[in-house]
Every structure is written in structure tokens, then in C-alpha cells.
Image (cartoon, rainbow, N blue to C red):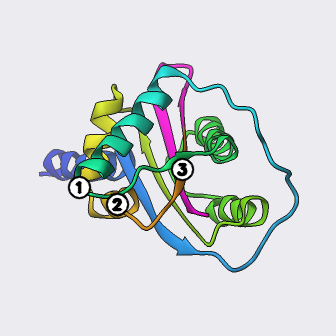
Amino acid sequence: MKSIMRSVVFIILITSVLSCSKDSDDVTETNTTAGLVTNYTYNNDELEVMQLINNYRLSIGLRKLEIVNHISYKSAEHDLYMIANNVVNHNGFEDRSENIVSVLGASKVGENVAYNYKTSADVVKGWLESPGHKENIEGDYTHFGIAVKLDSNGRKYYTNIFAKI
């Protein structure tokens, strides 16, 4: 009985860790500690995730989102934080969103995170099957950024930030 209970707890824990979404927050406070980042080099996974999200949005009659290097940079910072701390969460989301409001003039910011999906198609499919993630993907946003980073074991960490600018 204990082993069954441990298995159930383990499955619930893994399910909640593999994918997580931060509902969009309208942001009113600002943080001006960091300036605009204009350079960001995208890897193939990042380009593919953005294309898949925009293809999905177009398929349901929404306009595509514009890519913003600064938002991708903030996404990468969060991926590196999650890797360094071996966690999947939204810690620091308020700071990221306040930065995007301050630097880019956003009126609304949302975030999806995920972990250990093998392909871009898999992570987008996972997000679309989750109501909170799907809400962000279909949300009233105009711009976005993405970062996909690998940890030392080859596991992928994803942070996708959306903004209305």
C-alpha cells in the first residue's frame, strides 16, 4: 500500500513539475533597473516554438505575435535561474514583468514555463492541453519572447513570456 501511495504522489509531483503556467498579470508597478536588450541569438528550438505558437494563433483567427529580443533575454535569465536551482517555477515573475512594463511599455504580461519536453511540438502541444497555458497563448497579447536552455543532463527548460505593448 505504501508503494502504491508513493507512486501516486510521485506521478502527481512529476505531472505538476513538467509544465507550469503563470496566469497573465496586469502590471502596474515598474522597475527601471535594467535597460533594453536588443541582441539575442535564437536557437532552433526557440525559433520553432515561436513559429508553432504563431501558426496556432493564426489558425484560430488571432494575429501573430511579434518577437522581442528583450523579452527572450528575460526568458533566458529565468531558464538559467531554474537550471541553477533545479526547479521549475515562476519565481521572479513580478520582477520580469515589471521590467518589461518599464523598458517596453507593456500593459499586460503573462508567462508559461515548462521542463524536459523533447521537442518544440511537444511543449506547445502540452501548453495547449493545459487551460492556463492555452489562455496565455490565446491571450490579448501583441509580442512575445522565448528561451529554451539545456541543463548539464540535456534536459530542456522553457520560458515563454507574452506582453501587450
Q: Is residue 29 left or right of residue 80?
A: right
Which numbered disc covers residue 138?
2
> SS at mark 2?
loop
**How many neighbours does mark 2 have within 10 angstroms: few (below 14), some (14-19), or many (20 or more)?**
some
> SS at mark 3?
strand
Q: Amino acid at mark 1?
A: Ile
**Disc 3/disc 2 C-alpha distance (Å):** 12 Å
Q: State the extent of the magenta-drawn residues as a range.
A: 147-165
Q: Is residue 1 left or right of residue 126?
A: left
> Of helix, strand and loop, which mostly describes the magenta segment?
strand
Q: Do callouts 1 and 2 mark residues in contact (Cβ within 8 Å)?
A: yes
Q: Earlier in the sequence, mark 1 or mark 3?
A: 1
Which numbered disc covers residue 144?
3
**How many neighbours does mark 3 have within 10 angstroms: few (below 14), some (14-19), or many (20 or more)?**
many
Q: Is residue 10 visible?
A: no
Q: Amino acid at mark 2?
A: Glu
Q: Which image quadrant: the C terminus?
A: bottom right
> SS at mark 1?
loop
Residue at 47%, 19% in the rendered image: 154
